Image: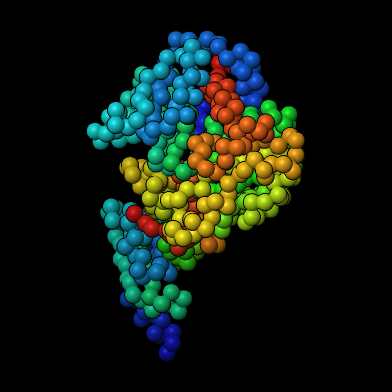
Amino acid sequence: MNMKKDLISITDFSKTEYLKIMKLAAEFEENPNQDLLKGKVVASLFFEPSTRTRLSFETAISRLGGRIIGFADPDSSSASKGETLHDTIKMVSNYADLIVMRHPLEGAARYAAEISPIPVINAGDGANQHPTQTLLDMYSILKTQGTLDNLNIFMVGDLKYGRTVHSLLMAMSEFENPIFNFIAPTVLEMPEEYKLFLREKGIKYFEHKEFTDIISAADIIYMTRVQKERFSDPIEYEQVKNVYILRNAMLEKTKPNVKILHPLPRVNEIHTDVDANQKAYYFTQARNGVFAREAIISHIMNLK
Amino acid sequence: MQDDQKKKLKLKVSAIKEGTVIDHIPAKNLFKVISILGLDNIENQITFGTNLESHKLGAKAIIKVTDKFFEDDEINKIALIAPHAKLNIIRDYEVVEKKVVEIPDSISGIVKCFNPKCITNNEQITTRFKVVAKDLISLKCNYCEKITNSNQIRMY
């Protein structure tokens, strides 16, 4: 029986594991360079390009003293010659001690984890899951709020297709008394299955169409991008494209502890005049990604 | 008179001595049921009738398999396409037990994931689903985690 650990979906981890990752991430932030992966090889397989996630992972691996093999885009891999994911994973798992992978198809990471005798970390599988993003979001929330309990979390923008908001919702639901506020146009509202999940857990949520001073109650404002390609009707897009933009003036009446998070890349949904506000946290959030990923790798590999 | 008619109807598909009779299969799904149960690959004697009159189903099919007794796991595979199927276990020409099919908690193979971007629709992988609702069936894909609803179910 293979007892290897994988991280494919955020729900693969328990609350205890979330808290362990938070604790380890804080330790790595204090002391990022630790040779825990010395002598180990990590395969970084990006079947779909991603600058931030790949560099963040590769920085985390380097700071842990590990070596990296892999590819940054599918054109330089054998997938471009028509090799199946199955065969690529079989081959790579002979070489490396850990696989970090991003793939455009949903479920690809779960499938790879079934094939691979070595642990697999999902760095994004299509619109499905991106669990390491969620853990770095949680670490950012914990760092800025001092707790993961009793928080009022506003999610804004594309709540239908945005995988980061779905995973964050599920993970934060493990903690005490969260309140969720969803702000989105009708076509991009939070899917019923997640609202049902909250109702079954007895967790309060509110839905809004307007992005107004209701955000004054927020502890966290999680912004996402409203993407043009999600709309079948271009007129509908034109009507909402400028509605879900956060501007500095809107933050005047917000709580002093509120922080603005965004998984990045940002296009225009956060006006650049917000960047200088001390409530803007998205760039530090991205920096936290390295520590969170060092923590995740250490946990998965039983190094800590 | 009515009893006579019933008897004649029954005789359209000959009786078996030992084995299983699967009744109340929707006629249009007969061959799928045969395939899912692997009846096209066994050597037992099999008789079937289809487009038989049924008050419930409109047109039903019936399969009689000699010397074959199904395990529950095996027979429940047909629940998605023949939810009202009834099994009669026959010993020495007599019905000794009746069974109905039950929708299982998980389904492997048989159904395609509705999500075109799911890895199972792009590589040769046996699909696996968790049955998340049984009245109006909905299936959660083990891989892409999307829900396939009853009106989206397609078979292989």
Name above or below for residue A191 compared with residue B89: above
Left or right: B152 in relation to A33: left
Name above or below for residue A53 compared with residue A235: above
Q: Residue at x 64, y 51 (%)?
A: A211
Q: Farthest bottom residue?
A: B1
Viewer-closest of A200 and A34: A34
Q: How is the image coloured?
A: rainbow
Name above or below for residue A17 compared with residue A105: above
Name above or below for residue A277 compared with residue A247: above
Total count of labels: 0
Q: Farthest left residue?
A: A81
Q: Position of residue A51 (x, y in %)?
A: 43, 29
Q: Quadrant of residue B66?
A: bottom left
Is residue B136 visible in the rendered structure shown here?
yes
Q: Residue at x 39, y 39 (%)?
A: A104
Q: Position of residue B20 (x, y in %)?
A: 40, 61
Q: Quadrant of the C terminus of chain A?
A: top right
Left or right: A179 in relation to A96: right
Viewer-closest of A37 and B79: A37
Left or right: A251 in relation to B155: right
Is residue A10 visible in the rendered structure shown here?
no
Q: Residue at x 47, y 29 (%)?
A: A52
Q: Residue at x 67, y 39 (%)?
A: A220
Q: Position of residue B102 (x, y in %)?
A: 51, 58
Viewer-closest of A214 and B5: A214
